Amino acid sequence: MTSEVVGPFPDGVDDLDAYDRLRRRVLWSLPTGLFVVGSTGPLHGAVRHNLMTANLVVQVATNPKLVAVAVESGALTAELMRAGGCFSVSVLAREDRAVVRRFVKPVTDTILGQDAHPVEMAGQPVKVATTGAPILAGALAWIDCRLHSAEALGSHVLFLGEVVDVGAQPGDEDADVLRMEDTRMNYGG
């Protein structure tokens, strides 16, 4: 699969492909975490739930407490975040790197409890946040956000969420958090 070479390019660059490879390598070197973003909302007449692997997650304001999540424009998660007006972020331990691979595509196997909330997604136990967004039950910590705003940015949408609730596993305060560099995955550039 060939990737599209995207500009702009500085004056004097003769080999656009070589420059693009360099630029991607530099952008991939930016340290980022690796998270699972939960979403829920009405879609085509039914309430859907999804979990998605993401690395573009960061706190961007302290008053109000806002978290930004960048999601591909056409992704199911983007649709659900708009429709449901919320999202969650599950923070994982380094040893859970295999878990994120379960969520690189939309979840198709969800088990619902008697209250119609998900209890398992892609074989992983989940619980439901205050907003209704799913959270991985085994996450080191989690953040629950009400959608504040969204900004279209070409290939991605930047969703800003106001933090309405958080949680953490007791005793895991010193655990190492999963980062992109802990996997063979790369994204962006």
Image (cartoon, rainbow, N blue to C red):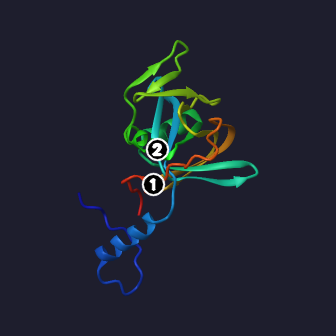
Residue under label 2: 95
Sort mark 2 into few (<14), some (14-19) or many (20+) by Cα contacts within 10 Å.
Answer: few
Q: Is residue 155 visible?
A: no
The answer to which image quadrant residue 29 occupies is bottom left
Pick the front one: 10 or 141: 141
Where residue 130 appears, as percent x and y from the top left, is 65, 29
Task: Name the residue that disc number 1 marks.
Answer: 180
Callout 1: few (<14), some (14-19), or many (20+) C-alpha neighbours within 10 Å? many
Within the image, what quadrant is residue 154 found in?
Answer: bottom left
Picture coordinates of residue 96, whole percent (x, y): 46, 41
Q: Residue at x 37, y 39 (%)?
A: 105
Q: CA distance from mark 1 to mark 2?
A: 13 Å
* Point 40% across, 52% down: residue: 183
Q: Find residue 28 and report its horizontal and vertical position in percent.
A: 43, 64
Q: Quadrant of the N terminus?
A: bottom left
What secondary structure is found at the residue carrying circle 1?
Answer: helix
**Label 2 sits on what residue type?**
Glu
Q: Residue furthest bottom?
A: 12
Return the residue found at the far top. Answer: 114
Quarter that holds the C terminus: bottom left
Furthest-right residue in this view: 63
Residue 151 image offset from top left, x and y in percent:
56, 52
Which amino acid is tagged 1?
Met
**Residue at coordinates 53% horizontally, 21% vertically from top-left?**
117
